[in-house]
Image (cartoon, rainbow, N blue to C red):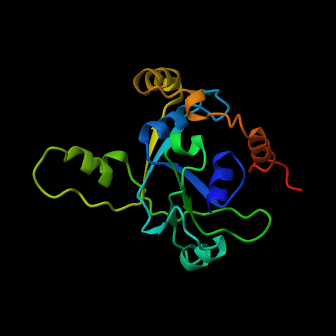
Amino acid sequence: MALLARLQHHGAATPLLDVSLDPMVGLYMAVVEPNGVHVETDGALFAIRRPAVDVADFDSRTFREIYEEGVQCGKVAFYSAPDVSDRLRIQRGHFLLGPVGEGSTARVTVPLTVENTTVQNTWLASRMNARGRKGPVPRATTDIGVFRVVGKFKTELKAWLEARSGLTDDFVYPTSWHQPHLDRFARAHSRTAPWV
C-alpha cells in the first residue's frame, strides 16, 4: 500500500484518491493547478467525512486482502500512509480507496451521500451558524461538503495563502531530486497517459 501511495502522490494512476487533512493545503490545490499555473476557471474544495474503515500505515496485508475485506462490498477505506516521501508528509497526504470498476476504462468510485439542496439549508450551514451557542451540534446528514473557489479570486487567494501559511508551488510539490525517475515514471503512467 505504501508503494501505491507514493506512486499516486507523484501522479501515477492507482486505485487511491489523494486527500489532505490540512484544509489550507486543500484550498491551495483548489487554487493552483499541479503544474503551477492557476487558471481562471472555478475550483472546488471538498470536505469529506472520514470513512469508518481504516487501513493502518504499516498494514502487512496485501492490497488484494485489504480490498476484498473492506472495499469490495461497497465501502470506502481511509488509508494513512507512512511518510514515504517529503511531498506526502508536507501535504499531510492520506488516501481514500473505493470500489474499482471492471475493464480497461474502469474508474475508482467513492460512494458518498450528498444532499441536493442550497447551501443555506445544509447541515454544514446549520453547524456553522450554531457555533458559540448552547445546545446540541447539528448532526451530519451527508458525507461531503463542496466549497466553490471562484476563478477570479484565485490570484488573490494564492497570494494570501503564500503570505499567511508559506504555501508555494516549491513547498507543496517538492521535486524528488534524489529520485528523478519517479516523477518521470508517474507522468508516463498517469490517468491522462495514452492507454497501450
Residue 56: x percent and y percent? 49, 65
User: Is 67 or 110 nearer to us in this picture?
Assistant: 67
Instruction: Work out which residue is located at the far left of the displayed protein and give it.
Output: 134
Residue 101: x percent and y percent? 69, 69
Q: Residue at x 10, y 51 (%)?
A: 134
Q: Residue at x 58, y 73 (%)?
A: 66
| Left or right of 93 on screen, residue 122 | left
Looking at the image, residue 144 lies above or below residue 181: below
Looking at the image, residue 90 lies above or below residue 82: above
| Left or right of 127 on screen, residue 119 | right
Residue 163: x percent and y percent? 43, 20
Residue 156: x percent and y percent? 47, 20
User: Is 90 or 115 nearer to us in this picture?
Assistant: 90
Looking at the image, residue 180 lies above or below residue 55: above
How many numbered dots are placed on residues in this image?
0
Quadrant containing the C terminus is bottom right
User: Is 147 or 61 nearer to us in this picture?
Assistant: 61
| Left or right of 152 on screen, residue 120 | left
Instruction: Work out which residue is located at the far right of the displayed protein and give it.
Output: 196
Report which quarter residue 13 is drawn in: bottom right
| Left or right of 5 on screen, residue 46 | left
Report which quarter residue 142 is drawn in: bottom left
Quadrant containing the N terminus is bottom right
